[in-house]
Amino acid sequence: MALQAGIVGLPNVGKSTLFNAVSNSAKAQASNYRFCTIDPNVGLVDVPDPRLTKLAELVLPNRTVPTQIEIVDIAGLVRGASKGEGLGNKFLANIREVDAIIHVIRCFEDENILRDEGAINPVGDKEIIDTELQLKDLDAVDRKIQKSEKLAKSDPKLKAELEILQQCKAHLEKGKSIRELGLSKDEKSAIADLFLLTDKPVLYVANVDEASMHTGNKFSDALKAAVASEDAEVIIMNNSIEAQISEMDNADDKQLFMEEYKMKEPALDRLIHSAYRLLKLFTYFTAGVQEVRAWTIHEGWKAPQAASVIHTDFEKGFIKAEVIGYDDFINFKSEAACREAGKLRIEGKEYVVKDGDVMHFRFNV
């Protein structure tokens, strides 16, 4: 169940360079001209998880399989995209398909890299994209309001939905995004069919120069201040250096390179983990001699739903789940030892899976 996070931003902010760094399965063309990316590049990115490594060290399986997130590199947006400028309509359609947005913002000065918007202004750049997404959402909300107004007069349910749509319209007209409106899960059902762009969770990447990669700079500080009210995370990184690290196959070379730049880990690892949290995802594990594997689920899923990511038959014929807490598995070092110590639990259909659970499902179809 690889959910999608789309990388967006103005042209020449480092989107494709970031994609090249995070993607294990594809390389995006990164060039110094507008609309270098036209069709979105897609790559599956492994989610680094030391728990998976520790389980594999104990079980010694034939193979170890991490969980993944799908990263989509989307064409650069320009002012007027909501009206079709540049690759506007195509860009916005691509964003509509992703589950979350990774918004890359240029926070460095370099006269050799083209920039259409004048002086470096990360807050202004953010607002350009926010405005274009809000305008596109406003258009979608307006069209649904027009269709609903007559029908709502005789249908109480539609009347309630219309009120929510009007709230959304008023909010967008103030230049604010839907995710800041604080709609409940039930209220969001009124707009679910619109797949609103500004309702998607956002993670900001401040692409800084080499000198600022540990501390940030005045540009990244301004960006942080601008998004403080959004409850959004800002990751500070130098996309070019991260791309260089990702291209190194030799672990020792990679470690030496990071030591040279005083890095404890690639910033990409922090980015991937942040994207995972942004999507409110959990990981559970299956552990056997044939395979130790991480599986992605949504926070709050019950055992049958979690089983479905292995195979839909597991959910249909679910009987029960054998569950060992991750810490117990590590402490007792094997499933057999956990069973003997009474640390293996039998859980039914109502069990809410916890992050890190080691599970085995029993089913019958």
Image: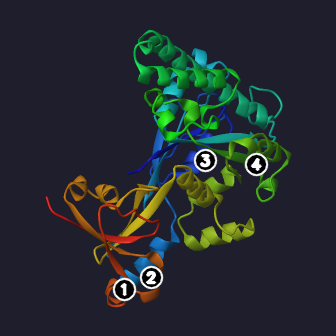
- Looking at the image, is mark 1 or mark 2 earlier in the sequence? 2
Q: Which disc, if any, is residue 208?
A: 4
Nearest-to-viewer mark from 4 and 2: 2
- Where does residue 169 sit, x and y in percent of width and height? 60, 21
> 294 or 24, which lies in front?
294
Return the residue found at the far left. Answer: 365
CA distance for labels 3 and 2? 37 Å
Spot occupied by residue 13 in the image (x, y as percentages of width and height): 69, 38
Q: Is residue 350 above or below residue 105?
A: below
> Mark 3 or mark 2: which comes first in sequence?
3
Mark 2 is on which residue type?
Asp
Q: Residue at x 65, y 59 (%)?
A: 267
Q: Earlier in the sequence, mark 4 or mark 2?
A: 4
Type of amino acid at the residue the image marks with label 3: Leu
Q: To which residue does mark 2 refer?
A: 328
Query: Is 220 left or right of 310, judged from the image as shown?
Result: right
Q: Which residue is mark 3?
A: 18
Name the spot of residue 362 as percent of width and height, x first: 22, 68
Colour scheme in the image?
A: rainbow
| Cα separation between marks 3 and 1 | 42 Å
Residue holding disc 1: 338
| Mark in front: 4 vs 1 | 1
User: In the image, what residue type sits under mark 4?
Assistant: Val
Q: Residue at x 64, y 66 (%)?
A: 265
**Element type where label 2 sits in the image:** helix
For discs 3 and 1, the disc positioned in front in the rendered view: 1
The mark that comes first in sequence, 3 or 1, is 3
| Circle 2 crowding by C-alpha within 10 Å: few under 14, some 14–19, many from 20 | some
The image shows residue 221, relative to residue 8, as above or below, that is: below
Task: Point out the tag, 3 or 4, that comes first from the N-terminus.
Answer: 3
Using the image, determine if residue 177 lies above or below residue 356.
Answer: above
